[in-house]
Amino acid sequence: MKEREKKSGKQLVIVESPAKAKTISHLLDNDYRVEASYGHVRDLPENAKQVPSRYKKIPWATLGVDIEHDFAPLYIIPPDKQKYVKRLKEAVQEANTILLATDEDREGESISWHILQVVSPPKDVTVKRIVFHEITRDAILEAMANPRGIDENLVKAQEARRILDRLYGYLISPILWRSVTRGLSAGRVQSVAVRLCVERERERMAFRSATYWDLLAELDSGKGTFKARLIRLGDRRIADGNSFDPKTGTLKDTNRIHLLEEKAKELAQAALNSSPWKVTLLEKKPASKSPAPPFTTSTLQQEANRKLKLSSQRTMQIAQQLYEGVDLDGERIGLITYMRTDSVTLSEKAIQQARNLIKNMYGNEFCPETPIRYQTKAKHAQEAHEAIRPTDLTRLPQDVKKYLTDEQFKIYELIWKRTIACQMVPAEFENTNVEVTVNVNGQPLVFYATGRRIVFPGFLRAYVEGSDEPEAELSDSESLLPELHLDQTLLPIQVVAESHKTKPPMRYTEASLIKKLEEEGIGRPSTYATIVSTIQDRGYIFKRGNELVPTFTAFCVTDLLEKKFMDLVDVAFTARMEEALDEVAEGEQSSVDILRAFYYGEKNQPGLAKRIENGEPYYPSVTIGNDPKTGEPLIVKVGKYGPYLQRGSGESRDMVSIPPTTPPDELTPEKASELLEKKSRSGETITVEVGTGRRVVRRHGRYGDYLEISQTDEERSSGQKPKRFSLPKGIHADDLTEEQIQNILRLPRQLGLHPEDNEPVIATIGPYGAYVKHGNEYRNLDSWERAFDITFEEALELLKEPKRKRAWKKSPTVLKDFGEVEGANGVVKILRGKYGDYVTDGTVNASLPKGSTAENISAEQAVNLLEQKRKKQTA
C-alpha cells in the first residue's frame, strides 16, 4: 500500500469522452488524473468472430445471451476498445481512489459498472460513484463531497433494454431477410416509429380530396381596412376543410352548405353590389399565454428541428459539445447542463439568476412576484435531474458567440432564451371577434374576422415558441383590426370567391415524430435521436424537405410485422415495456421476469421464441389499386434491387423498378400504369440488324437504356443469353440515328493485332464512354462516336501515351491534419473529396455534418464523428 502511495497520490477520475475529460482536468488540480473510457468498454458480441473461443460451439453464443440461464449476457471487450481498457487498467494500478464520473443516466451508470468489472481495482483502492448534471468546478466538488455506490437497479434496467433489443433484432431480422429482402433490420422501438410513419402515409394514400368555395371580403371602416371571410348563409354555416370525410371526400356535416364555384362567384358579385355592410357582432376578450417550460431532451430536439432545421442527432451532438466544454479565452467551460433529461425542474440558483437577469434586462414588470416552478408530468421522470439550461445564465449568448461555431451559438442561444422566458410573466392579449352582415336577395351573408392585440408582451420579449405547422403563423403574433363599433357601416372594396382543397394529414417531421413518441411513452431521452437517425440510415424513411417519408420497404416490413408480431409493433405494448424497464430502474420489477415473459411468453400469450419457431411464411406487398386500363391488380414488392411494381401474376405479369425515394402516396394507379407502359415501350423493335435481319429491341434496365438482338427459338430454349449492347451514359435509344445504332451493333471493333505481342487492339463503348483496349491497357476516347471510326494507327499512338487518371480518382485535398488523436485508429485528417469534406483516420471515413467546415471541427469532434460512423458500420 505504501509503495503505491509513493508512486502516485492522485485520484483517478473516469468519464466517457475525451472532451469531457479535457474539461474536467482543467477544473481540477494536480491531485487528480482524468481518463476517458471512450463510451462503453464492453458489449454483446456483434458477430460470430467476436465470440470467445470457449463459447463458439454453444448455440446461443452468437446471440450473446444465455437464454437458458436467466438471460445472462455474454460480454466482450470490442477490438476497438481494448487499447482504452488497457490504459484504464494501468491508471487504476497507480491510483488510491477511483471516482466513476460517467453521465447520470442509465447508460452512464452502466458504463461505470462495466468499467469496474474490467479494470478489477485492487482491494485497497477506494471506489466512488459521483454524478453531476453540469461540468463546472462547483458541481464537481459538490459531487465529490456526496459520493454514492453504483446503482445496480439502473444497471439492470440498461442491461435488460440491451438484451431485449438484441433478442428482438437478432431473431426477427432474419425473418425480414427471408420474406422481404436481405440486409433489413427490426428494432424494438425503431419498428414502432417506422409503423407510425407508415400509418400516416396510409392515411394520405386513402385520402380523397374535396373542393369547396367561400368568399373573402376586403372592407373599409374609414379608419383602415381588414378582411373577413364568409361563415354563414342565413342560419347555416359554410362548409370548411373539416366538413369533409378524408376517406371519401364527401360532406360529413349535411347541415353545412357545400358552396360550389358557380354559386360562390354569383354570391361574390351580388354581395359587392349590395348594401349596407354592418358590424352585427363585436366581442373583445382578454387572453393570456404562459411561457413554455425549460427544455427537456425531446423539446430541445423538437424546437431545434422547427426553428433551426437541425436533425435530432445533430442537435444532440452540438448539445453534447456545449455540455462537455468549450474553450473560452483559455478557460474550458461546460456551457449547459446535462442534455439527456425528461425533467423540467430548475435549481433554485438558476431560478434566482434568471429572475435577476429579467429585472435588469427587461424591467421588474416582466418578473413574476414568485418564482415559477414546473412539475414534470412523466410518470418515471427523475426529479433530481434538471432541465437543460445554461450553467451560468449571466453568460449571455452574445458574450460567448465568438468562441462558438454557428450551430453551437444557435443552440446555446435557444437554450438561454427558453430558460429566461420560462421565468417571465405571461403575455397578455386582447382578442377581438367581429361579424359583418350584408343582405343579398333577402338572405343575410355573415362574414367573420378576428384580431389580436398584444396588451403586454411578457415572456414574448425573450422567446417565441415554434410550430409544427410550416404554413401556420405563430399564434403569438399580432393581427390588428381597425377601430370598430357595433352597427357601424362598412364599405366593401372587393369580394372574391376563393377555391380551397382539403389537405391530407401532414407527414411527421423529426419534431412531430419525437413529440408523438414521447406522448405515447415510447423511447426515453437518451434514445429519441438514435431512433430517428436509425430509421433513416436503414432506408425505412427518407427526408423530403423537413418531412419524414416512409419507403415501400418500410411498408412491406410493417405489413409483415403487423401480420406476424402485431403486439411488438403495437404502441401500447411498447409503452408498457418502457414502463416495465423504468420499474426495473426503480427496483420495483425483476429484469429476468420481463425477459422471460418476452421470450418464453406468459399465460395464454406465446413468447417470441414460440412464434418464430411456428411461424408460417408471409410475403408482404403493397396494393396500389387496379390498372385503370386493364383492370389488373397493381402491387409493389421489395426485392434484391429495391422496390418494384407488378401488374398481373404468373408468366403474364409485367414488372418495373421503382425509384427508392418514391413517396408511396404519389404512386397512384394512373402513375403506376404509366410506369408499366413506359417499361413495355422499352421492349419495342426499333430497327433490324443489317446483314442478319434480326430485330433490334430497345430495353430499359437499372442503369439506363440498352439494345438487344432478338433470338431464335433454338437460342432461347438452349438458355443462350441474348446479345446486348450498352449505350453511353446519358444517351437514350430515342436519341440515336439509324447509322449510330448499326455502328453500336458492330462493337467491339477489332482494329488489328499489336506489333509487340500480336494481341488484339479493340475499340468499344463502356459505362463511362468509348475507349481502346490492348491487354490490360485502356485509353479513353474524347467522344463515344470515336469508337466507330478510330483507325488502328491512331489507336496505337493513343496507347503509347501515359494513362490519364480519371478526375474522380484524384487524391483528395488535405484541409486539416490533427495527427495522432486518442480514440482514432490512425492519423486523423479532414479531406476534401469528390462528394464533399470528410474526416478519416485511414480506416473509417465520416462526412462532416451539414453546416460544418474544417475550420470549426475540433480533434475531439472529429474522433466523435468517426466513432459514430464506426458504430453504424457494425450495427
Image (cartoon, rainbow, N blue to C red):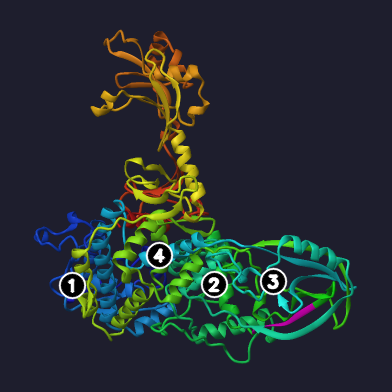
- What amino acid is labelled 3 in the image? Ile
The residues colored magenta run 426-435
Give the CA distance from mark 3 to mark 4.
37 Å
Q: Quadrant of the C terminus?
A: bottom left
Residue matched to label 2: 415
Q: Quadrant of residue 595?
A: bottom left
Disc 2 or disc 1, which is closer to the eye? Answer: 1
Residue 378 percent location from the top left of the image: 43, 82
Q: Which mark is residue 257?
A: 3
Give the CA distance from mark 2 to mark 1.
42 Å
Q: Which element type, helix, strand or loop, lies under badge 4?
A: helix
Task: Mark 4 and mark 2 in contact? Answer it, CB < 8 Å.
Answer: no
Residue matched to label 4: 195
Q: Which element type, helix, strand or loop, lies under badge 2?
A: helix
Mark 3 / mark 4, whichever is N-terminal: 4
* Residue that protrudes farthest toward the bottom in the picture: 370
